[in-house]
Image (cartoon, helix red, strand yellow):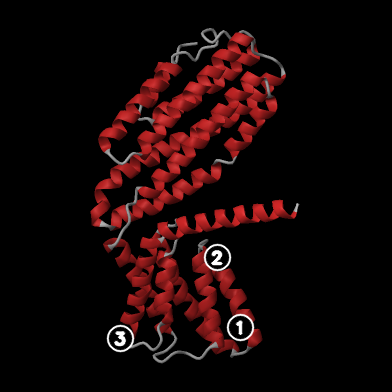
């Protein structure tokens, strides 16, 4: 028993070490950017502006760059404005209330509420509250309290300069996200196909749960696209990729709709399995459609995540052809579906197919026209 526990611990440690090495390797370039930015901002504020110990120049640049997916321009604004307003609020309340512990508590409480009133940003709230608290608790630096605000602005400007002069490819994160998202959608359909074949409604319910768990992935990709769009706008080297990012964003909208429709489909499929609403032939036909659609989604994933234009167009063309062929069979009669509840299953799959076709670049009306008329 002790040997089994020791072996499990070793496996756990090996897994943690491997994942840590991968994270460190992937973070090498951002780490260099953050180091150059923080030290450069500190040096500029100290040697050029003459500020003594300008720690806020370094810390604000680190916060503005960071590893967050939020757009950097927003983070820079949150750091600079939060710092400036926090100092102003702290200085005013210090003048009215005086210095002390209870005054610090009042200042911090008021600053947090004010920050939440002005903006929903977490960094903005943290900076405003922190600065107002430091004004009350610490002596003002040489040059007055607002030198900290200037330092924060310096750090933010350096962060923007690093973003412009040393950008990473803004398409990298959205491509990873779309691969993950489409993989999950394909697996939802494969689980639905398996549930049909095995007549297992529990498995169909698991597919529904998996589909529901995809929403954070959609939100994450939207964040990536916002941040990437900002980089593509600021960095001249990547402005030519803005059209590609726009196309990815349009595809994401359709993928999101397809995911929502997959959840509706999986829920109805659960009921159809429980009520034995499909004949053996219909089960075989619909399961085949689901497996083929999952394979087409894999092809779509390769297309949307591909770096080279020619290869991307080839994958998208293949995915479009495969999905069109599947869509042309989506009629209850063609799939040998006879009962009303079984027909509902087919009818609910048709909007999902339209969404996928639109994700490949097919016009909405053209996608609907591919479906056989009812």
Dot 1 alpha-carbon crowd within 10 angstroms: few under 14, some 14 to 19, many 20 or more: many
Foreground pick, 240 / 122 = 240
User: Answer yes or no: do the residues labelled 3 and 2 have beta carbons within 8 Å?
Assistant: no
Label 3 and label 2: CA atoms lie apart by: 37 Å
Element type at mark 1? helix
Numbered label tally: 3
**Horizontal and vertical percent for residue 95?**
54, 89
Label 2 and label 1: CA atoms lie apart by: 20 Å
12 relative to 346, above or below: below
**Horizontal and vertical percent for residue 21?**
47, 58
Foreground pick, 94 / 307 = 307
According to the image, label 1 marks what residue?
104
Element type at mark 3? helix
User: Answer yes or no: do the residues labelled 2 and 1 have beta carbons within 8 Å?
Assistant: no
Kindly identify the residue that appears in the image at 35 percent across and 66 percent down.
33
Q: Is residue 80 visible?
A: no
Q: Which mark is residue 117?
A: 2
Q: Which mark is residue 47?
A: 3
Q: Nearer the viewer, mark 3 or mark 2?
A: 3
Q: Is residue 132 left or right of residue 321?
A: right
């Amino acid at each position: 028993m002790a040997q089994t526990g020791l072996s499990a611990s070793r496996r756990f440690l090996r897994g943690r070490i491997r994942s840590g090495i991968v994270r460190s390797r992937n973070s090498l370039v951002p780490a260099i950017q953050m180091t150059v930015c923080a030290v450069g901002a500190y040096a500029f504020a100290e040697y050029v502006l003459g500020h003594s110990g300008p720690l806020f120049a370094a810390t604000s640049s680190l916060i503005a760059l960071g590893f967050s997916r939020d757009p950097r321009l927003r983070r820079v604004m949150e750091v600079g404005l939060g710092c400036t307003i926090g100092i102003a609020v702290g200085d005013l309340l210090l003048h009215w209330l005086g210095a002390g512990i209870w005054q610090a508590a009042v200042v911090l409480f008021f600053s947090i509420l004010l920050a939440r009133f002005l903006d929903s940003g977490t960094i903005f709230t943290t900076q405003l509250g922190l600065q107002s608290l430091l004004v009350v608790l610490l002596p003002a630096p040489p040059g007055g309290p607002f030198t900290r605000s200037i330092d924060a602005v310096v750090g933010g400007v350096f962060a923007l300069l690093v973003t412009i002069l040393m950008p990473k490819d803004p398409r990298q994160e959205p491509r990873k996200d779309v691969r993950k998202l489409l993989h999950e959608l394909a697996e939802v359909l494969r689980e639905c196909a398996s549930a049909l074949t095995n007549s297992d409604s529990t498995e169909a319910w698991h597919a529904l749960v998996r589909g529901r768990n995809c929403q954070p992935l959609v939100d994450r990709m939207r964040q990536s696209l916002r941040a990437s769009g900002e980089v593509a706008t600021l960095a001249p080297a990547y402005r030519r990729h803005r059209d590609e990012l726009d196309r990815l964003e349009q595809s994401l909208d359709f993928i999101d709709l397809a995911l929502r429709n997959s959840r509706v489909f999986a829920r109805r499929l659960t009921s159809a399995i429980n009520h034995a609403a499909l004949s053996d032939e219909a089960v075989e036909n619909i399961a085949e459609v689901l497996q083929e659609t999952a394979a087409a989604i894999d092809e779509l994933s390769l297309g949307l995540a591909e770096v080279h234009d020619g290869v991307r167009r080839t994958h998208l063309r293949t995915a479009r052809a495969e999905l069109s062929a599947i869509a042309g069979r989506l009629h209850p009669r063609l799939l040998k579906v006879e009962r009303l509840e079984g027909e509902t299953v087919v009818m609910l799959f048709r909007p999902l197919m339209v969404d996928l076709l639109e994700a490949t670049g097919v016009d909405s009306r053209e996608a609907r026209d591919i479906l056989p008329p009812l």
